[in-house]
Amino acid sequence: MTMISETQNKVQPEAQVHVSRGYWQTVWRNLRRDPVAAVCMIVLALIFAGAIFAPLLTRYDPAVGSIVSRLKPVGTEGHILGTDEQGRDMLTRLLYGGRMSLLMGTVPVLLALVIGGSLGTIAGYFGGRLNTVIMRAADVLFAFPSVLLAVAIAGALGAGVGNALVALTIVLIPPLLRVTESAATQVRALDYVEAAQASGAGSLTIIRVHVLGNMLGPVLVYSTSLLSVAIIMAAGLSFIGLGAKPPTAEWGLMLNTLRTAIYSQPLVTILPGLFIFLVSLSFNLLSDGLRSAMDVS
Amino acid sequence: MNDMTANTATPGGTPKLSVRELSKRFHVSGGGLMGGEARYVHAVSDVNFNLDKGTTIGIVGESGCGKSTTARLIMHLINPDSGKISLDGDPVGADPASLKKFRRDVQMVFQDSSASLNPRLTIEQSIMFGATIHGTPKAEARKRSHYLLNRVGLDPARFAGRYPHELSGGQRQRVNIARALAVQPKVVIFDEAVSALDKSVEAQVLNLLNELREEFELSYIFISHDLHVVRYISDTVMVMYLGQVVEYGPVEDVYNTPQHPYTKALLSSMLSVDPDDRTDAAPIQGDPPSPLDLPSGCCFSPRCSHVADICRSLSPRITGTRTRQVACHLVDPAAGHPECAT
Amino acid sequence: MNTPVLNVRDLVVEFKTEDGAVTAVNKVGIQLGQGEVLGLIGESGSGKSVTLRALLRLLPERKSSISGIVEVDGRNVLEMSDKELRAYRGGETSMIFQEPATAFDPVYTVGFQISESIRNHLGASRAEARARALELLKLVGIPSPETRLDNYPHEMSGGMRQRAMIALALASSPKLLLADEPTTALDATVQIQVILLLRELQRDLRMGVIFVTHDIGVAAEISDQVAVMYAGRIVENGKARDVLKTPHHPYTEGLLSSTVHGAKKGETIDAIPGMPPNLADMPPGCAFAPRCRYATEICHQEKPELETGANGRRVACFHALEVA
């Protein structure tokens, strides 16, 4: 079109172009302005930072205790959160335990998001027979109660962190698959996807440019709420001995080993549970906040 | 516009877009593993037309008449069961490369201005998308998008960086038009593209479409249920009823001397803005039947006031010349309709 | 004019938004006689649908405020108690909508829903109500009404559902019928049938009707008087013939000239430039001034009042005469 090149000079320089605030910027702004979500984000950031920087925050070794100072109460000098049944510093155990617990809670969700998300997007976008095959396979897994399935898989594979991760990932794939599939199916039906097809774009390009960005919202909300479930399930597996093994510090496992001391040191005993609760609740509330923050235009 | 001038060299005025015997039926139920008789919706049967360069064909009809399906079949958004489509003499659809080229040459603007723009992309990104798919460098695509924004009446400095939800319906439809033009098409299909707009905005957009057709030497396929709009913008008009073409011809011919009883009914349903020129009686009663249970014979026979025995048993053939066609026993002497003029 | 069935004065509807109050309807006045049809014409955002809903107090109470006088058959709707309001809605005043699919509950048959409304408003017995429902379906021209009575809404075609919705609205023999673009979603050949039906029913039942539409052609078919709304105000009001044949307000003139009815092919349509103002950010003077070809300095500074002229004609424009 020669006409275009002739008139191009008339077009204003790009420096003056007005750029509106993008969708994710708006969501982030809304999220920060939501007091509950903001508190949750701060709590989570503190707990994650504590776990990551554990060696800098404490001088004790999480695995080494002292027989003379067993089950000290909260507030003991030198052991601000007390000590456990083997005389190990609780604060240290909680910080190091966070590393394992958070890892076991978040990694399966991320893996399931990648695997289930890809399969769900493919199933939703292409539809037809491919969709039927993928979704019916997911239904088979979905038919079992998730906690039971996780225990069964972890039990069959044997105790250990790695196996627990595999079990949790398998359990989390079907729900994420369903959510991404329905999101992709919805976006797939919109005119702009058809318009993109009509301009000759290939499926991969359309998925990348038009589909993923528009299904990310609901998937992100759902994944965040799954994090809160996964944290509890991971701790649960360790609690019944199918996850982390002693002497590793892990919140679920700590709950198990401390449970004999529930009458002598109740406060110390519930500390790991409190952390599990805090993280799980924060993810849950954050998910709600995210949902309302995304409710724009 | 160098590529276009090359094409006009074709002698004898070869039609730019030619559609031959385009048909599609959708499977509804039965005939699978569970057995039972297979049921189909005949969405579009045997559509034929030519579209010359710089002209507009209007497709009118009521909901369920197959006009939007026709558009999607032409774009190959739905695969036709049968039919030949060619552009400048080149057949389309045989191989992926011809389809990709075709989808650059033919673009589409949809009714819902909001659903047809990706909400996560800025206006500029949406317009650039098609061009970059076809290998235009980003910087050039951006320049062109700004030019086109200007051309459709939106100041690029104000609008390029905005998101669709910040625009009004009329502005968004202008963006959709710019987006369609960004890949330098030869044919643009408008599927009820002005139907959702307010009347004063509709008039602005129609004026714009007329200007753009001239400037870019475009051909339009204009699908609408609004007979006034089709008359204003089209050169040729095709009237569809339940997936079949019932009448085809130059727009003034069809509007002034309609031949098919359905066309007559449709045209007398047009409302006038003059309160002294009110309609006294509805030209036809009832709704169009469901495309699932098509009547035997002529599909319009249940609502037609000229219905005869032959209409209920035999589907009328298309008669007339290459440019003016009707599918009705009334105008086909061979059919032996009692009311036939000759 | 005969006894007014509807008398609206200084109707103001405000919506509370995050950025303050937005006036969606501003000082609207309507006089409607028994058996008279008012065509309320306007584009999206003009306030025509909000006006209609305000007459039934259907707007969300926490987010909106309605003030002014709305008298239906001599009673002020804005002062009704909740109980009175329930009897009034669907009683003296009924409404029909653009999308009949949403007006019916999909899980009950059409006949049941119409009978229920009859029993609620008229206190009839089950059998009486059913007989009356059958009568109504006959009245609105639904073929084989006996079987249609037991149909679910999804079993009917669009045109038939719209007829059934009219039957539902007529269940309580209303004095005032509010119609919100009831033919917009219909096909042309069906639209004209529904318009003719409404025209006939309104004449036979002596109902007052407010017919909201964006289509001047529809208004011309059915209206005795028309009111043109722009940005929340009525800018012109009068007998349909007067207003549509000799518009006095530039906006009405623009609307008429921008319809493609009768526009010659290839000729540029005389379209109104620009678009309606944002209700949250209104120009200080006449709302139409930025788009108006006749606008002078005063139009940009002061809001013109709706002045009554000869033949009951009302126009809100400083240059009304020049236009004619």
Image (cartoon, coloured by chain):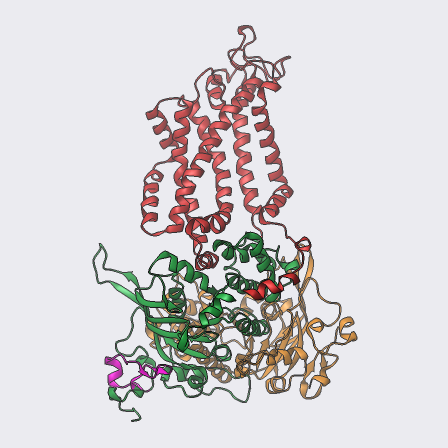
Chain colours: A red, B green, C orange
Residue C56 percent location from the top left of the image: 58, 68
Determine whether A140 is above or below B143 in the image: above
Q: Quadrant of residue B142?
A: bottom right
Q: Residue at x 50, y 59 (%)?
A: B115
Q: Nearer the viewer, residue A67 or B121?
A: B121
Magenta stretch containing residue B314, yes or no? yes
Residue occupying the far top of the picture: A68
Q: Quadrant of residue A138?
A: top left
Residue B130 percent location from the top left of the image: 50, 57
Residue C283 percent location from the top left of the image: 73, 67
Magenta stretch containing residue C300, yes or no? no
Q: Nearer the viewer, residue C254 or B85?
A: B85
Going by the image, does A154 lie left or right of B165? left
- Quadrant containing the N terminus of chain A is bottom right
Q: Residue at x 24, y 62 (%)?
A: B38
Determine whether A127 is above or below A2 in the image: above
What segment carries the magenta color? B306-329
| Residue B169 in sight here | no
Residue B317 percent location from the top left of the image: 28, 80
Going by the image, does C316 lie left or right of A65? right
Going by the image, does C255 lie left or right of B242? right
| Residue A279 in sight here | yes
- Quadrant containing the C terminus of chain A is bottom right
